[in-house]
Amino acid sequence: MKTGMIGLGAMGAGMARNIAQAGHLTAVYNRTAAKAQNLAAELNVMAYSDPAQLAAAVDVILIAVSADSDMLEMVEAIARGAGPGSIVVDLSTVSSTSARQAAQILSEKQVDFLDAPVSGGVEGAKNGTLAIMAGGDSDVLARARPILAAMSRRIVHMGAVGAGQATKAVNQIMAAGINQAVSEALAFGQAQGLPMADVIEVIGGGAAANWFLEQRGLTMTKGSFKPGFKLALHHKDLKICQHMAKSLGMTTPLTDQTVIDYERLMAEGWGNEDISALYRLKRQLK
Ligand code: NAP
């Protein structure tokens, strides 16, 4: 199936390369056109300057943009170009409500929709090892599966449209807790003057081992916070989680504290750093 990718940021570029390698990618679009032109030249595919034109030229349209309004803006454009029977898969992290809104807009054009947020970081996008949590019709997922399989090692159907994003919210709350735990523990280790590479190596072989420690532990102790996953994007996700928790009558103290911490870091100008920049607060780095 001819596939087009919209959004060639930290995640989208890696995904696009893997779909190209599997022989499915035929078109790309990015708001900042130079990124699309460069990647199109590298992968020998077509760069479009209009998402509606891209949608008209492919069977499957993948989206990986920042936030809810960005995704819905792209869906509105896609709806102007996509033909009946084509499939739109949103890989961005947004709310379940926005996912259902996208599905509604597209259904008026007989275009199918899946919300399929991912986990696994830029490393997962680059290596084709993402976990995909999908919401939507199981037949539509079956049709899109060969494309998604090119960028992932685990695809789980979570239910109707919106269920993928609901699952991703669970992931984002957990990621906040892991960030708090890893950054606080490593700051504590560093304050004791321990050899941090050895601390990370030995802890990474025990019960406290985790992906974030392995991928971001050493860089954070060296004061390097290159994204990765931009702090402002995780903040956007946690605001969605807070909203969902409120409607469930739940409290989420860990999430609330992380939102406060991120807002402080964003006010200090660190929003485009990786989420491991939480270490700045733990070590009181400027
Ligand atoms: P990113 O590097 O900041 O890239 C964002 C992309 O979205 C860029 O291509 C940007 O275009 C495009 N974009 C933003 N607003 C747009 C708009 N209004 N119209 C059209 N395009 C727009 O972000 P990312 O890390 O790739 O994240 C993409 C999505 O994946 C987000 O929802 C994020 O929460 C989610 N996610 C990220 C990670 C991670 O580790 N990074 C992991 C899982 C999920 P320009 O180039 O023109 O700015």
Image (cartoon, rainbow, N blue to C red):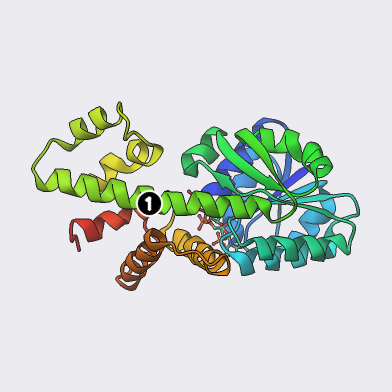
| Residue 8 image position (x, y, % from top left) | 59, 52
Camera-side residue: 53 or 113?
113
What amino acid type is highlighted by mark number 1? Gly
| Residue 57 image position (x, y, % from top left) | 83, 50
Q: Is residue 230 left or right of residue 107?
A: left
Name the quarter where the N terminus is drawn: top right
Name the quarter where the C terminus is drawn: bottom left
Q: Residue 205 appears in which quarter of the rendering? A: top left
Residue 21 in view here: yes
Ligand 1 within 8 Å of disc 1? The answer is no
Q: Residue 81 appears in which quarter of the rendering? A: bottom right
Q: Which residue is mark 1?
A: 177
For this orientation, the residue located farthest to the left is: 193
Q: Is residue 120 above or below residue 205?
A: below
For this orientation, the residue located farthest to the bottom is: 267
Could you tell me how many numbered marks the image carries? 1
| Residue at left offset 73%, top offset 62% | 100
Q: Is residue 39 left or right of residue 272?
A: right
Q: Is residue 118 left or right of residue 259?
A: right
Camera-side residue: 272 or 159?
159
| Residue at left offset 57%, top offset 51% | 168
| Residue 73 image position (x, y, % from top left) | 69, 68
Q: Quadrant of ligand 1?
A: bottom right
| Residue 267 image position (x, y, % from top left) | 33, 73
SS for dot 1:
helix
| Residue at left offset 58%, top offset 46% | 118
Residue 222 in view here: no
Q: Residues within 10 Å of mark 1 (few under 14, many from 20)?
A: some
